[in-house]
Image: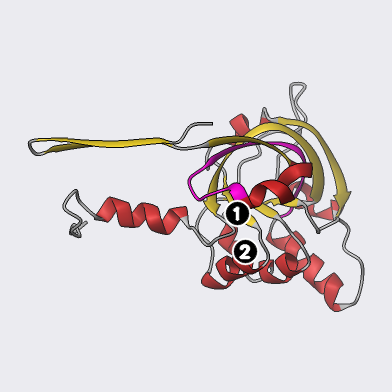
């Protein structure tokens, strides 16, 4: 694990180098690890995760409204916002890149209050979701968009467990190994999307650029 940061100025040139911390985490240990994670940390995740996109989320909320048990164990687990394509060439799945997490924002607060511990997607979250992440000691991980084939290489097994009629968007249990992720929103409210934009706008004198 490394956490070295330095900046160096020479004339009009300012060079900043940041080496973020890295963690190898098993999903069974995520509860213990979450408090140590900061926005910007790199995580290589191993263990069981579940896929679910907006259609599956909508159905799960409808099930809760009817007082029914959810088809996946939400408490302490991780949901990946993805709809993997059919398996090919000996792989567990085809391409399996993240979808935009904002599509799940209307459903996420309720799942977080039920104990959902981690989410994987791309893009920023709503203020309400960020607040619930903090209140419920959860974490939102960003996966690399447009790299579905790369992500698929980390998936060792996939099994449909609910809503098979949704095809690629059915809920699947997947075993992953060293899936590369970035902590986008941590349990203390750190938000890489917002802090990153702020750092980009601010020059070496601490003033706002016009970009």
Give the quadrant of the C terminus.
bottom left
Q: Residue 140's mark?
A: 1
- Residue 98 rendering spot, x and y as whole percentages: 60, 46
Residue located at (69% from left, 56% from top): 53
- Residue 124 - label: none
Q: Position of residue 75 (x, y in %)?
A: 81, 58
Part of the protein shown in magenta: 36-52
| Residue 48 image position (x, y, % from top left) | 79, 41
Q: Is residue 12 left or right of residue 27?
A: left
Question: Which of the 4 image quarters holds residue 116?
Answer: bottom right
| Tag 2 and tag 1, C-beta contact below 8 Å | yes
Count of labels in the image: 2
Q: In front here: 124 or 38?
A: 38
Identify the residue at horizontal 86%, vertical 56% (top origin): 73
- The circle on residue 133 is 2
Left/right placement of residue 115 relative to residue 149 reads right
User: Which of 91/13 is in front?
Assistant: 13
Q: Residues within 10 Å of mark 2 (few under 14, many from 20)?
A: many
Quadrant of the image for the N terminus? Answer: top right
* Element class at badge 1: strand
Label 2 – label 1 distance at C-alpha: 8 Å
Query: Residue 199, position in %: x, y?
Result: 31, 52
Sequence order check, earlier mark of 2 and 1: 2
On whether residue 47 falls in the magenta region, the answer is: yes
């Amino acid at each position: 694990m490394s956490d070295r940061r330095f900046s160096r100025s020479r004339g009009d040139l300012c060079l900043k180098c940041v080496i973020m911390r890295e963690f190898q985490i098993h999903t069974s240990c995520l509860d213990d690890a979450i408090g140590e994670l900061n926005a910007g940390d790199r995580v290589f995740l191993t263990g069981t995760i579940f896929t679910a996109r907006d259609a599956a989320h909508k159905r799960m909320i409808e099930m809760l409204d009817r007082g029914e048990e959810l088809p996946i164990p939400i408490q302490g687990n991780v949901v990946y916002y993805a709809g993997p394509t059919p398996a090919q060439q000996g792989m567990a799945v085809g391409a399996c890149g993240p979808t935009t997490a904002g599509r799940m924002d209307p459903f996420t607060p309720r799942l977080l209050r039920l104990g959902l511990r981690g989410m994987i997607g791309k893009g920023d979250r709503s203020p309400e979701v960020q607040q619930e992440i903090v209140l419920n000691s959860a974490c939102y991980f960003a996966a690399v968009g447009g790299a579905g084939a790369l992500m698929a290489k980390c998936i060792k097994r996939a099994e449909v467990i609910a809503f098979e009629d949704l095809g690629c968007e059915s809920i699947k249990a997947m075993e992953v190994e060293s899936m590369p992720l970035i902590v986008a929103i941590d349990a203390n409210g750190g938000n890489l999307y917002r802090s990153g934009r702020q750092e980009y706008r601010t020059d070496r004198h601490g003033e706002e650029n016009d970009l």
